[in-house]
Each structure stands twice: as structure tokens, then as C-alpha cells.
Image (spheres, rainbow, N blue to C red):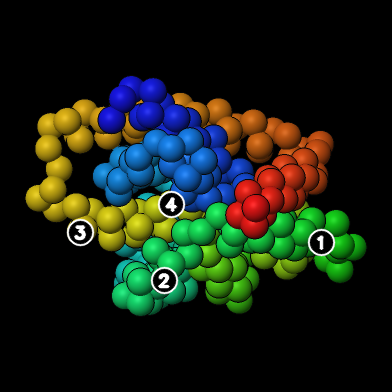
Amino acid sequence: MTLFHIFLVAIIQGLTEFLPVSSSAHLILLPSLTGLEDQGLAIDMAAHVGTLGAVILYFWSDVRDAIAGVPRMLTGRIDTPGARLAFLLAIATIPVVIFGFIIKLTGLDTAMRSVALIGWTMIVFGLVLWWADKRPSKQMPEKTQADWNLRDAVLMGIWQAVALIPGASRSGTTITGARALGYSRHDAAKLAMLMSIPTIIAGGILLGMDLVGQSDMETLRDGTIAAILSFVAALFALSFMMRLLRSVSFTPYVIYRIILGLILLAIAYT
């Protein structure tokens, strides 16, 4: 791969992983719309490692508490904030692992990589996000991270699993689920980002199993560059979104999704 191609993949992955606009859709569209070769699973995994590092660094205090709570959780003691957070993150990850395994076994992951499908999902799930973000809240005051419970973790986990459809957006569907459950914009985004950590790790393990023995020094070099660049881009995008949410709704992202979706549908059907 050329350095420019690696740069494009890493920046697209880094900027879109945590924004509700679907990073997977943008990566699928990159070779489709530019004529570049598909970057392959190894580079995709490396870029995801970079975004994983960014979200861990940004939410380090929560991640540290969850890690410290894992031993207590494993012994059945959900009696500290860290153990509770680790337990709920584990529960929220189960749906996406199950659905992802089913999709991989059936080969649907390849079948769903179409421009038309991504166009429709960008629009439909963008409108659903707008609805969830704008609907009058029945919760007064709005829920925060401290209110996260088993029921909400399961429901948000299902929303996250829906994002396996290209174009739906993992962060977008999870935030949609959280807003529909009554969480504030900031805490909905924060929970969605924390949920991404075990999900990206699980996806990385799955991709890693496919890549065992296939990597070479050139791929390792390209992957390292992709990881570093995506880390920087993801940290910037994550910081920007979390700051912006204190004063702005998700509407700008919805508008972007609808415009891009319409463009993709025009391309697909003409």
C-alpha cells in the first residue's frame, strides 16, 4: 500500500469510528468510490487498534475503574462502581458477539457490502437518531451513567448489534438506544464509547484469528502507521464530539448522513 492510501484509511477510520456516521460504511466506500484496492483485514484491524487506544486514553478513569472491578465481577461481587461497570459492559457486548458470529458464519458480511444498502441505512438510521434525540424525554431529569442498569445494558447491546449492518453506525445506533431510554446526550455518547472498548477488542480477536500466519514485515509496517494515524484522528474526533454535545444536538450528524445517503443512492441507482 502507498503511504497516501494508508493515510486515507487511518484518517477515515479515526474520524468516523466514534461519530454517529458509520466508520465501516466509509471504509467500504473508499475503494468503491476512488478505485483504490481494498486495504484488507490487517489494515482495518490496525486502524481499529488505534481507535481503541484513543477511547481508552480519553475515558481512562472509567476504564481504570472497570479493569479494577473485573476480579470482583468474576467472583460474583458486583458491589463496587468498577465491578458494576465491568459487568454491564460485558452484558452489553454479548448481543454483538452473537450476531457477529452468525453473520460471519452465514457470509452475510460480504453480501451486505453494497453502496445501495449503505445509502438506505445512512438515511434510515440517521432519521431514527434524530427522532430519539428530539423526542420529548419522559425522564425528568435525564438519566446519567450512574443510572445505567442491566435492562438498559441489554437493550443498548441489541442496538449496538444492529450496527453490524453497514451504514447503521455502531456509535450511532448505541447513542440512539441510549437517548430513547432517556439518557442525556453527553452520557449517551459516553456509554456508547465505553461499550466500544470490549466490542473492538472482540472484533480484533476475530479478525486476528483470520490473519494468523498471513502478515509480513510490509503489512506490519503499514499497520503500525495506520494505527498511529487513526489513534490521533480518533482522539481528535472523540474530544470534539464530547465537547460539542454540551451545546449542540446530533442534528448536524443526521444532516450529513442524509446528504451522503442520497448521494450514494443516486450513484447506486444510476
Q: Nearer the viewer, mark 1 or mark 2?
A: 2
The x and y percentages for residue 145 are 64, 56
Q: Nearer the viewer, mark 3 or mark 4?
A: 3
For label 1, count other residues whose C-alpha is less than 10 Å away and answer few (under 14), some (14-19) or many (20+).
some
For label 3, count other residues whose C-alpha is less than 10 Å away and answer few (under 14), some (14-19) or many (20+).
few
**Type of amino acid under label 3:** Met
The x and y percentages for residue 188 are 67, 54
In the rendered image, the quadrant that contains the N terminus is top left
Q: Badge 4 is on which residue?
A: 197
Q: Badge 3 is on which residue?
A: 209
Q: Badge 1 is on which residue?
A: 131
Q: Relative to residue 228, is residue 65 depicted above or below?
A: below
The x and y percentages for residue 180 are 75, 66
The CA distance from mark 1 to mark 2 is 28 Å
Q: Are marks 3 and 1 in contact (CB under 8 Å)?
A: no
**Type of amino acid under label 4:** Ile
Q: Nearer the viewer, mark 3 or mark 2?
A: 2
Q: Badge 2 is on which residue?
A: 108
Q: Relative to residue 28, is residue 231 depicted above or below?
A: above
Q: Which of the two labelled residues, at mark 1 and mark 2, occupies the earlier sequence position?
A: 2
The CA distance from mark 2 to mark 4 is 24 Å
- The residue sitting at the right extreme is 136
**Left or right of 54 on screen, residue 188:** right
- The residue sitting at the left extreme is 213
Residue at position x 53%, y 64% from top? 165
Residue at position x 48%, y 40% from top? 30
Q: Relative to residue 103, is residue 163 depicted above or below?
A: above
Which element carries disc 4, helix, strand or loop? helix
